[in-house]
Image (tube, rainbow, N blue to C red):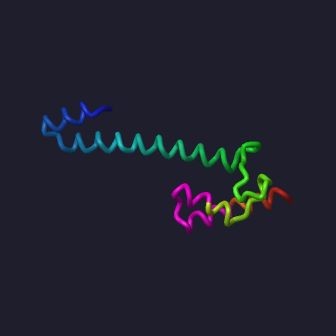
Amino acid sequence: MSSKKVFKQILEENAVGARNTVREMLYSKLKHKLNEKYIEVSRTYFNEGKMEDVDGDGQVGNDTEDAIATKFMKMGMPKDKAVAKAKSITAKKKKNKK
């Protein structure tokens, strides 16, 4: 899909087609960006051997909920969702240690 297709539809007075084409283009770009962010987050928190020291204590994998939530908030996640996600991650880590 390209802008040529959009302009062609506009010139043909096909507003619905132009709108749908623009929507498809934007969703495609959004999907690409979300996939990039998903890969970044999943590499950071879920791949063994690729985790990082989030709280700066020199140890990987024992990060506090606050440190993990702060990391998510820096990536643009709202505070309430970041805290919930951090609690989920630390709970899984605690469960796996048992």
Give the quarter of the image for residue 68: bottom right
Q: Which residues are magenta?
A: 71-88
The image position of residue 95, as x and y in percent, is 80, 60
Queried whether the magenta region covers residue 81, the answer comes back as yes
The image position of residue 2, as x and y in percent, is 30, 32
Q: Please, is residue 37 above or below residue 56 in the view?
A: above
Residue at the spot 48% in from the left edge and 44% down from the top edge: 33
The image position of residue 62, as x and y in percent, is 78, 58
Residue at the spot 13% in from the left edge and 35% down from the top edge: 12
Q: Quadrant of the N terminus?
A: top left
Which residue is nearer to you in this view: 36 or 98?
Answer: 36
Q: Quadrant of the C terminus?
A: bottom right
Residue at the spot 72% in from the left edge and 43% down from the top edge: 50
Give the quarter of the image for residue 22: top left
Which residue is nearer to you in this view: 25 or 67?
Answer: 67
Queried whether the magenta region covers residue 55, the answer comes back as no
Q: Main secondary structure of the magenta part?
A: helix
Residue at the spot 66% in from the left edge and 44% down from the top edge: 43
Count the marks.
0
Q: In the current view of this chain or complex, which residue is farthest to the bottom?
A: 80
